[in-house]
Image (cartoon, rainbow, N blue to C red):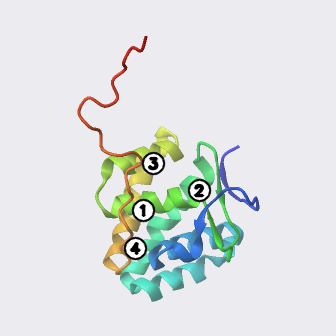
Amino acid sequence: MTGLRVDPSLNRYLCPVCDLANGERLIISAFRRWLHDRASLPKIAQRFCQSLGRDKGHRAIEGFCVLFDLLANNARRQISLRYPGSDKVSTDERTLIALVAAAQHNNHDRVAALVRWLLPSAVQGLAVINTLAFAAALKEGGYILAQPSPRRPAEKPGAGLLKAVS
């Protein structure tokens, strides 16, 4: 099964919503609202325009819509989002935030890696382009996300080598 789904489970949390910055909350709220009620797109667009300004809001909603549709219709696996208003954030929601944050900070290797993780190769290029547009509109509107931290510490010389133990 692929696509987006609402996840009511209690064991997929990474952090509480109150730990997120305003831009991160805006992104998660938009994904959740549209997944829960497809008729809510005008309200989501209005929120983007109020938060970012009219032009940047329209650019953001265009990138967001294409990215959402790509994930909903082509995801490699089911991506779990919480219900609108939930006070916790799923690991998949944090992955989406990390994707946009990496795009804002021009970390193209991380953007490509996250897109490869989420989507098949046929739609990856389109996903990268729309993620970059979405992230740029958010950034220009004043919503700068924190740069994702590396998953592992920087390698030290000689680290990672196999050693024989007798």
**Which residue is the site of mark 4?**
59
Within 10 angstroms of label 3, few (less than 14), some, or many (20 or more) residues?
some
Q: Quadrant of residue 99?
A: bottom left
* Amino acid type indicated by mark 2: Thr
Compute the Cα span from label 3 to label 1.
10 Å
> Where residue 91 is drawn, which disc sits there?
2
Within 10 angstroms of label 4, few (less than 14), some, or many (20 or more) residues?
many
> Where residue 21 is drawn, which disc sits there?
none
* Amino acid type indicated by mark 4: Arg
Compute the Cα span from label 3 to label 4.
22 Å
Compute the Cα span from label 2 to label 3.
13 Å
Name which residue lies at 51% across and 56% down: 95
Q: Is residue 62 left or right of residue 81?
A: left
* Amino acid type indicated by mark 1: Val
Compute the Cα span from label 4 to label 2.
27 Å
| N-terminal-most mark, 1 or 2 | 2
| N-terminal-most mark, 2 or 3 | 2
Q: Quadrant of residue 100?
A: bottom left
Name which residue lies at 68% across and 74% down: 84
